[in-house]
Image (spheres, rainbow, N blue to C red):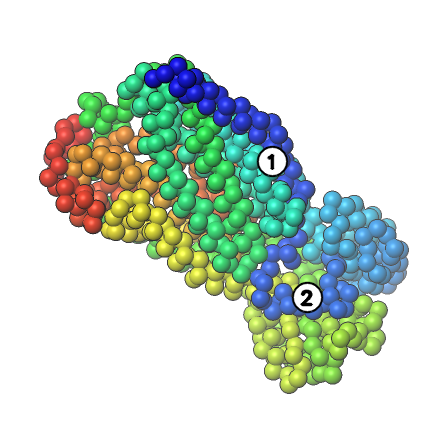
Amino acid sequence: MSTAQRWARRLLPLALLLVWLGVGGTLGPYAGKLGEVATNDQAAFLPRSAESTRVLQAREAFDQSETLPAVVVWTAGGERLTADQRAEATRAVAALAGERGVVDRPSPALLSDDREAMQAVVQLEPDLGEELPTALEAVRAAAQQVPGTEARIAGPAASQADLSDAFAGIDGLLLGVALGAVLLILLLVYRSVLLPFLIILGSVFALGLACAVVYALADRDVVRVDGQVQGILSILVIGAATDYALLLAARFREELALREDRFAAALAAVRRSFGAITASAATVALGLLALLASDLTNNRALGPVGAIGIVCAVLTTLTFLPAALALLGRTAYWPTRPKAADASAQGSGVWRRVAALVAGRPRRTWVVTALVLAVFAAFSPSLSSKGVPLDEIFVNDAPSVAAQRTLGEHFPGGSGNPAVIIADAGRAAEVTAAAEDTEGVASVAAVSASGRPGGGEPLVADGRVLINATLESSADSDAAKDTVERLRAEVHAVPGADALVGGYTAQQYDTQRTAARDRTVIVPIVLAVILVILMALLRSLLVPVLLVATVGLNFLATLGVSALVFENLLGFSGTDASVPLYGFVFLVALGVDYNIFLMSRVREEALAHGNRQGVLRGLTTTGGVITSAGVVLAATFAALMVIPLAFLVQIAFIVAFGVLLDTLVVRSLLVPALVIDVGPLAWWPSVLARRGATARPAAGVDAPSG
């Protein structure tokens, strides 16, 4: 090798390292800036074609689409309220007219039938952003002027403020918890001082680059970001970058133990792990992009944002980490000394014992394992995904939840969140009558020119009227959703009315139905994408089918366990409508990752040693690194639980538990035993199907068959 070539081999890693240091220093701060372009306005994430979404668009003609209701509720500790207190409450909120963020005059205070509570609605501007808490504090201060009462604020404005508060500081808190968990695990597992910090640094660089790209796109309205997408992006990038880095670092350690040249070892490690890493990343990225087929805007938002994060994770793994390892060599693993993971070596390691168990009775192993998973999977239908009630959205008892509960105790359950009907003005009377006759509707009133329901002549815009229907049941309940379904049937039947029904309950109903439709569309797309990638990587038809089937069984078993844990331990009555789909995309795509890591190595070994020995050697050589990667990814997703939202807590549990189940059971026992039992035929039509049975045997990891 010439002097110029030697210098080039040393300068390229140094140049790559300097480039990434520049990227980290320049783009790193964007990891804390995504909140500037994020929105937590849930109306922006409704189904595109749903009836409730069309109602939102139609309300623009009434100049009422740009409001966010805050419902003030007064109580007096169980005492009956007086007419004077009602008058004082009306004067207090009326004084808010003209205040920053308040739209028009607030409604008069209304006494409950039991006279133990009052309510008034203050319409706020929906785009207040960081000023929303200030506006709500002004409303609260005014409401507290009523003597002898306690005032609380419920409704969409209060819920949105609590939601923003839940995501406050998400960047620093979530990132700190996730990186701290990853660092601790890496230090314990690898007993190396420098390598864990290199891996963490690479994941931070990937996150900074991903956040900068997403920030630029969101700032130009190319993609949408909310607090949930923001949190998932951070976890996804850190987890994926760490997983890919562990695979590459393990391969580099093997190569370094076989040769003195650390630059050649780094190049060989990249070459031999490139296929597995890129195939694994492709399954996750394309699985996420399949969410673009969703009719729910927040699902479509996560697709490209998550895919961008995965691409950035792969970039750092295949460029920054090899460059750093090439420059450091054995120093990266200090104080341990790199050793080749030789599967034929004598020893009594954990993975040699696992391999012996699988080799001894492969059929019994995979049958028993599959049956246990099937038992858990039998509980999966009991996981309700009809939506999370308002009082369960937050893990802690948020102020808006307590206020809504108080409101529901004294007023019809739908108070503050009425169903909104838009219909032809010439058929207003017929539509109102049809709505009043609908079972589950407490009261109906057309919005007047003053902006208040029942306050005079109906407000007419473009020949249409706006009617509010207060429901008897809580706006987030199944009973309310059933009422909306009946209400739609009744008003749609009015000839010439061209009526539409929207509002909060209708939005939840439409979201639930759309989520169910999305699952039937997106699940097959994700499975097809994964199958194609596996077939291309493994050059086989049967093995990919077996791998997808085992990951699918793992997903159903995880849902079954989640159903039991959510209901009996965590107290959730159900999950958000999108939770099963998110869980499927993450768990199936990420679960296939570990099977890719395993089976790509099995194929490499089987080409030389035959199917049986290839499986056992692949299991022993990859067991440690894949298990470490699984534990790291589970811990990373578990960090989402620091955000007190039921949606993220549920996603965190499903992915964390599912990854551990896949890593420790499916990939360690079920898949190897199944491939051994099927034999070389599993690789058909690959050359392994013909050569596998006759390849030379190898000693060391095999065990007598039972």
Figure quadrant of residue 673: top left
Residue 413 lies left or right of residue 176; in this view the side is: right
Q: Nearer the viewer, residue 186 or 270?
A: 270
- Residue to which mark 2 is pinned: 57
How would you rate the neighbour count of disc 1 (Cα within 10 Å): few for under 14, some for 14-19, many for 20 or more? many
Q: Is residue 328 above or below residue 144?
A: above
Residue under the point 83% across and 75% down = 456
Name the amino acid type tagged 2.
Answer: Gln
Residue 406 visible to the viewer: no
Residue under the point 71% across and 79% down = 424
Q: CA distance from mark 2 to mark 1?
A: 34 Å
Q: Which percent across, then down, holds residue 401?
A: 65, 52
Q: Earlier in the sequence, mark 2 or mark 1?
A: 1
How would you rate the neighbour count of disc 2 (Cα within 10 Å): few for under 14, some for 14-19, many for 20 or more? few
Residue under the point 52% across and 34% down = 206
Name the amino acid type tagged 1.
Answer: Ala
Q: Which percent across, then down, holds residue 277?
A: 38, 37
- Residue to which mark 1 is pinned: 31
Q: Which percent across, then down, holds residue 597?
A: 33, 37
Q: Secondary structure at mark 1?
A: helix
Residue 266 visible to the viewer: yes
